[in-house]
Amino acid sequence: MSAHDILAAARDPVAEAVGTGRIAGAALGVTTASGDRAVHVAGHAQIDPIEVPLLRSTWFDLASLTKVLFTTPAILRLVADGRIALDDSLTAAIPDLRQYDPSAPERRLTFRQCLSHQTHLPAVEPLYTYGQDPATLRAFILQRVWPAGPPCYSDINFMLLGIAVERLTGRPLGDEPLAPGLSLRPDPAQCAATERCTWRGRVLRGEVHDENAFALGGAAGHAGLFGTIDGVLDAALGLLQGTALPAEALAAIRTRQSGTRTVGWEARHDGWSGGDACSAETVGHTGFTGTGLWIDFSRGIAWALLTNRVHPTRHRESGIAELRRRVGDLIAGACA
């Protein structure tokens, strides 16, 4: 089937979510490994305090898609260049990690463990409440005695990886080169709005929604990337075609490190965000703002659903979890 036909099979639930006001705006896109592409946009980039229509060229705050479209590729390229190995400890790049305690467990964490969320670090910490000086917050992250717990999906893992990238490249994350359609400094006038933030006292548009990423300077290993629907689909196409990363790096993101995780990505499992109809060779990731990307390597197809479901507030039920799964099932079903 063509990308247009596949997209058509999944448009209705997106249109319904926007039409009923559960989600302000959405862009749904499909690409096949051959490069055939189709995109559907609906709704508004902003409704508070003014209405701004959503366009195909609208930039979305990708939130945790930063982990897979920015930080994971950056680490894997450094591995391919021989700067580090996946099973090196983070101290290979950050020798001052927990520097006052040589036996600290954080000093034994590896890049692979952080990429696949197999560490003792907590899911999240309200770092922004401790201050807004990026250098001091980075130092706090490195020297904090983190509480131990079972492995979980953790923003802290990727904050550490972001710091490692900065150390190894010698430049701030905000200065890293990016492909067209991806940016850490988008034009706010071309962005979808996210939340009316009670902490910052304004509707956020073109500045990162994630409070910790904002306090860290706007770009961090776990959040800060913005993208258009075509920019996200371009990244997915590069992975489908095997041109975006070296072969070993591509194999790493397709190889399970646990029942639910590969290197960087989430692997298909029962009840996950990509639906149940996709193949076992599917990886995906979501972002808190309402974004998501899934790549079915077996079927040679990828789809992205970008929304601003937190606009104007995160404190309401948008139905995004059910919408993601429904769209995934319809897309995979159309390819069957």
Image (cartoon, rainbow, N blue to C red):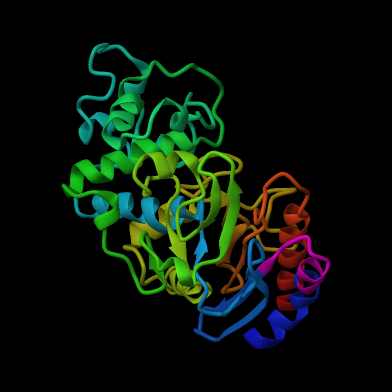
Q: Position of residue 122 (x, y in %)?
A: 52, 26
Q: Residue, x 48% and y 23% (percent of image)?
A: 120
Q: Position of residue 212 (x, y in %)?
A: 45, 38
Q: Which residues are magenta?
A: 15-25
Q: Position of residue 37 (x, y in %)?
A: 56, 84
Q: Is residue 331 left or right of residue 307?
A: right
Q: Residue, x 50% and y 43% (percent of image)?
A: 200
Q: Is residue 321 left or right of residue 50?
A: right
Q: Is residue 77 above or below residue 187?
A: above
Residue located farthest toward the left when viewing the structure as drawn: 170
Where, quadrant-wise, is the C terminus in this rendering?
A: bottom right
Q: Is residue 293 above or below residue 96?
A: below
- Whether 70 is among the magenta residues is no
- In front here: 77 or 198? 198
Q: Is residue 306 above or below residue 286?
A: below
The image quarter containing residue 5 is: bottom right
Q: Position of residue 139 (x, y in %)?
A: 28, 27
- In front here: 239 or 122? 122
Please tell me how many numbered marks the rendered image carries. 0
Where, quadrant-wise, is the N terminus in this rendering?
A: bottom right
Residue 246 visible? The answer is: yes
The image quarter containing residue 22 is: bottom right
Q: Is residue 57 left or right of residue 318?
A: left
- Whether 21 is among the magenta residues is yes
- In front here: 119 or 101? 101
The image quarter containing residue 143 is: top left
Q: Residue, x 27% and y 45% (percent of image)?
A: 165
Residue 281 visible? The answer is: no
